[in-house]
Amino acid sequence: PPEKRAANAAPNRARPVRRKPTPAPDRHPDDAAAWVFAQARTERGYKRRDAIQEAATNEFLTKGYQGASLRAIISAAGGSSETLYRQFENKAGLFQAVVERRMLSSYEDYLTSGFGKRPLEIELSEFGLAYATAFIMTQQLDFYRMTISESASMPDVSGAIWEHGRVSVERHLADYLRDQVEAGTIELSNPLMAARQFMEMAKGSLHLHKLCNGMIVTQAEIEENVALAVRIFVNGVRK
């Protein structure tokens, strides 16, 4: 009977609802390090995010931005594409997160180990060495090259990387210099501009030589360049 056939028929199965990826949380430029390292809510989430970023780091360094494959990154990291898109939105967002993470992790230990509590020459020397070494002697240089080459095609991403990476570090140094001005140790009208100038002096032409022609740069050369930068800078700002 029709009633019996209806009773024995398999129940209709609801189709799974595809949810849009959760957008990345708002980022605050003054708290960039916290944004990079505090996106996942669980320990498992932290591990997944780290695994994706490590796999993405290798993929980007090996194949460049254009050649990098999200499928290959997911395969190397494990997990699903849904996780990747939920946490990073897209390829550009993942690249941005990877670069910002590497930039900030290069200085994180230094900036959280009593930065701003030492005499001027020592503070500038330690800061300059940490900055120049991270910028010249690590894979950060390769990501810097990629960011510049892709800046025309994704200006929003390259601008955000600049804001949350370099600018965040600048502000730390500018705040320290402002404190020194208020303490009467140095004389400056624009601490932020002075911070930017010192950072450029710290890496000097060594950065461009290695970036453009692959010149081998030694740690001793970086230390010599930073020492000279500190001497010139301090002589120019001390009262």
Image (cartoon, grey):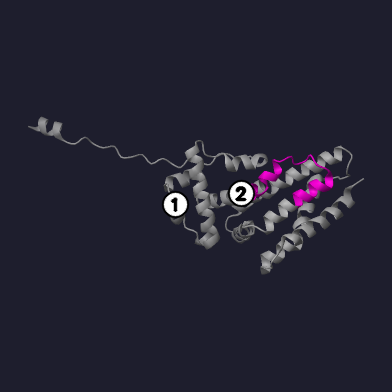
* Mark seen at residue 100: 2
Q: Name the kind of residue labelled 2 in the image.
A: Glu
Q: Residue at x 79, y 59 (%)?
A: 224
**Distance from the alpha carbon under mark 2 to that under mark 1:** 20 Å
Q: Residue 50: within the magenta? A: no
Q: Name the kind of residue labelled 1 in the image.
A: Ile
Q: Considering only order in the chain, which callout, 1 or 2, is on the residue closer to the N terminus?
A: 1
In the picture, which quadrant includes the C terminus?
A: top right
Relative image position of residue 230 (x, y in whole percent):
83, 53
Q: Residue furthest right?
A: 239
- Helix, strand or loop at label 1? It is helix
User: Along the horizontal axis of the image, is 70 left or right of 29?
Assistant: left
In the picture, which quadrant includes the N terminus?
A: top left
Relative image position of residue 47 (x, y in whole percent):
50, 43
Question: Which secondary structure class fits the magenta region best?
Answer: helix
Count residues near mark 1 (Cα–Cα under 10 Å), then give few for <14, some for 14-19, many for 20+: some
Q: Residue furthest left?
A: 1
Q: Quadrant of residue 189?
A: top right
Q: Which residues are magenta?
A: 102-128
- Helix, strand or loop at label 2? It is helix
Front one among 13 and 184 = 184
Count residues near mark 2 (Cα–Cα under 10 Å), then give few for <14, some for 14-19, many for 20+: many
Relative image position of residue 212 (x, y in whole percent):
67, 67
Q: Residue at x 54, y 58 (%)?
A: 60
Front one among 165 and 139 = 139
Tally of numbered discs: 2
Residue that badge 1 annotates:
74
User: Along the horizontal axis of the image, is 203 left or right of 69?
Assistant: right
Q: Is residue 227 above or below residue 87?
A: below
Q: Residue at x 51, y 45 (%)?
A: 49
Front one among 7 and 198 = 198
Q: Quadrant of residue 188?
A: top right
